[in-house]
Structure formats: structure tokens, C-alpha cells
């Protein structure tokens, strides 16, 4: 009988990464044929019945991708940490279960991709060379050219156990800049500028890989075009 690892099946059909699939399996959220699943388990993807949180996970016939302008105050998660949390996934009206591709912190706004294609999400998030993410940053005071050069040069210890890589910073005006990263440590931009005495007052992501925010207002969303999806696939596989 044809067999596939359960975490791979979930990545391909439930919109989660393989790492997240393993975490869900460990917590007992996944069952196969009515029995709680175990790590490393293989299944028959034709005959076995897989459920996640009591909902059947069927083989996906097509993938879904949405670009969302996440408003400030929403969290990039599918699970509420507190009763009054607002989830970015709640902004999109869809019949499929969607998951955020990457994270954008609660105090920030801008572009985030929601998808049910965990396999592509894995490739994007685990890509060795990193993929570009572009942000508009508003600061608490005028920023000097010397500080822009120092922050962009990388090598900053922001407490994540490793140093920042070089990035691109372009001045917009005295207190605003565009920042292009190829990594995404927790609250990285805020911490980089904080080291030089700047408070980030406003942070908006305007691009993720080849996908741009465009004119979407906070809370708005759109389906990605076939061309955008294909370009993202090629970039993730290093074929761009």
C-alpha cells in the first residue's frame, strides 16, 4: 500500500509546516482512523482517515493563497492566547483552513500571506539563502546617516543568540526609512533601531518575496494571482 509520513500529509493538505504538524501530533490533536496519532507515523493517504482537532483532513485538490493587510492589534496565529485576541486568519472569508506564512508582530501592520499549502510554506520559511521582506519604518526622532550605515552593516546582538545579517536601509525622510531583510528574528527591526536609541513608532511590511501590499487598506485582503504563486514557488525552490 502507498505510504506517506503523517507530517508530510498534513503539510500538503492541512496548511501547516512539517514542524507545526509534528507539534500538533505531539499534543494529541491529530488522529488516524479514530486513534491518536504518533510522531513518525506513516499512513495510507488513500484509505486512512486523518483528523485534526476533530475535523477531517482530506487530500487537497488545489492550494489557496491570500495577501492580507494585517491591522495593528491582530496576531499572526490560528490560536488565541487570550480571550480578546484577534486573529489575522479571521479577516479572510474562506471555506478552507488557512495558516500564516511567517509572522508579523501584534504592534505591526502590513502584508502577510495566508495559505493552506504547508509544503510550499515549509520551502519558503526554511530556504537557506533567505527571502526578502520589505518594511516601512517610522522612528521617534531624526535618524543620522551614520546610524543608518551602522544598522545596515549587520553584526548586531539583539539577544536572539545570533548576530543580525547585513540589510538594506533607504531613507524616506528624516524619520522614515525602508528596510529590506533576508531574515526575520523576533521583533528584529524594533530591536536593531533600539540599540541606537530610536523607538519604532510605526512598522508596516510592504513586500514579502515577490508579493506586494499595494493599495490594500488594513483589514483588506485579496487572492494571489497564478503568476504571483508560480513566481513564489520558483523562488522557494531556487529556480527564480
Image: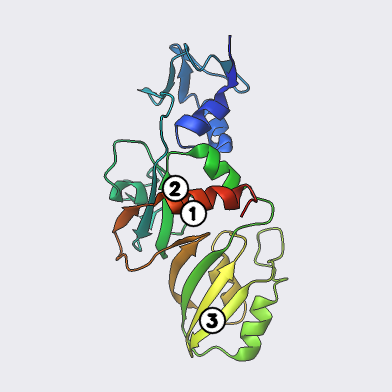
Q: Quadrant of residue 38?
A: top right
For mark 1, what is the residue?
103
Q: Residues within 10 Å of mark 2 (few under 14, many from 20)?
A: many
Q: Is residue 134 above or below residue 224?
A: below
**Which residue is at a point 36% across and 59% down the rendered structure image?**
70
Question: How has the structure been colored for display?
Answer: rainbow
The picture places residue 19, in percent across and down from the top left corner, at 58, 37
Of labels 3 and 1, earlier in sequence is 1
- Residue sitting at 45 percent across and 52 percent down? 227
Q: Position of residue 14 (x, y in %)?
A: 44, 32
In the depicted structure, whether residue 8 falls above or below residue 32: below
For mark 3, does the 10 Å Cα neighbourhood hold few (<14), some (14 to 19), or many (20 or more) residues? some
Per the rendering, the mark at residue 100 is 2
Q: Secondary structure at mark 1?
A: loop
Q: Nearer the observer, disc 3 or disc 1? A: 1
Among numbered discs 2 and 3, the one appearing first in the sequence: 2
Whether residue 76 appears in this view of the structure is no
How many numbered markers are drawn?
3
Between the C-alphas of marks 3 and 1, the distance is: 23 Å
The percent position of residue 174, horizontal first and vertical second, equals 49, 91
Between 202 and 111, the residue placed more toward the observer is 111
The answer to whether any part of residue 235 appears in the image is yes
Quarter location, residue 123: top right
Q: Are marks 2 and 1 in contact (CB under 8 Å)?
A: yes
Tag 2 secondary structure = strand
Mark 1, Cα crowd under 10 Å, few <14 / some 14-19 / many 20+, is some
Quarter the N terminus occupies: top right
Q: Residue furthest top?
A: 1
Numbered disc 3: secondary structure: loop
Vertical arrangement, residue 148 with respect to residue 15, above or below: below
Q: CA distance from mark 2 to mark 3?
A: 29 Å
Q: Which residue is mark 3?
A: 198
Amino acid at each position: 500500500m502507498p505510504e506517506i509520513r503523517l507530517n508530510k500529509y498534513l503539510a500538503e493538505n492541512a496548511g501547516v509546516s512539517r514542524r507545526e504538524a509534528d507539534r500538533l501530533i505531539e499534543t494529541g490533536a491529530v488522529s488516524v482512523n479514530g486513534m491518536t496519532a504518533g510522531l513518525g507515523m506513516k499512513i495510507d493517504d488513500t484509505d486512512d482517515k486523518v483528523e485534526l482537532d476533530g475535523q477531517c483532513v482530506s487530500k487537497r485538490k488545489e492550494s489557496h493563497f491570500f495577501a492580507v493587510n494585517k491591522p495593528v492589534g491582530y496576531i499572526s496565529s490560528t490560536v488565541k492566547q487570550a480571550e480578546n485576541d484577534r486573529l489575522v486568519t479571521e479577516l479572510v472569508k474562506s471555506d478552507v483552513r488557512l495558516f500564516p506564512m511567517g509572522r508579523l508582530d501584534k504592534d505591526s501592520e502590513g502584508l502577510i500571506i495566508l495559505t493552506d499549502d504547508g509544503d510550499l510554506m515549509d520551502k519558503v520559511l526554511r530556504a537557506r539563502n533567505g527571502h526578502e521582506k520589505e518594511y516601512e519604518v517610522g522612528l521617534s526622532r531624526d535618524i543620522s546617516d551614520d546610524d543608518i550605515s551602522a544598522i545596515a552593516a549587520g553584526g548586531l546582538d539583539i539577544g536572539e543568540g545570533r548576530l543580525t545579517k547585513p540589510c538594506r536601509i533607504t531613507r524616506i525622510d528624516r524619520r522614515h526609512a525602508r528596510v529590506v531583510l533576508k531574515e526575520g528574528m523576533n521583533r528584529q527591526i524594533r530591536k536593531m533601531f533600539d540599540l541606537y536609541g530610536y523607538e519604532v513608532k510605526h512598522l508596516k511590511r510592504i513586500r514579502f518575496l515577490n508579493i506586494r501590499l499595494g493599495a490594500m487598506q488594513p483589514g483588506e485582503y485579496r487572492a494571489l494571482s497564478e503568476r504571483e504563486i508560480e513566481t513564489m514557488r520558483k523562488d522557494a525552490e531556487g529556480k527564480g
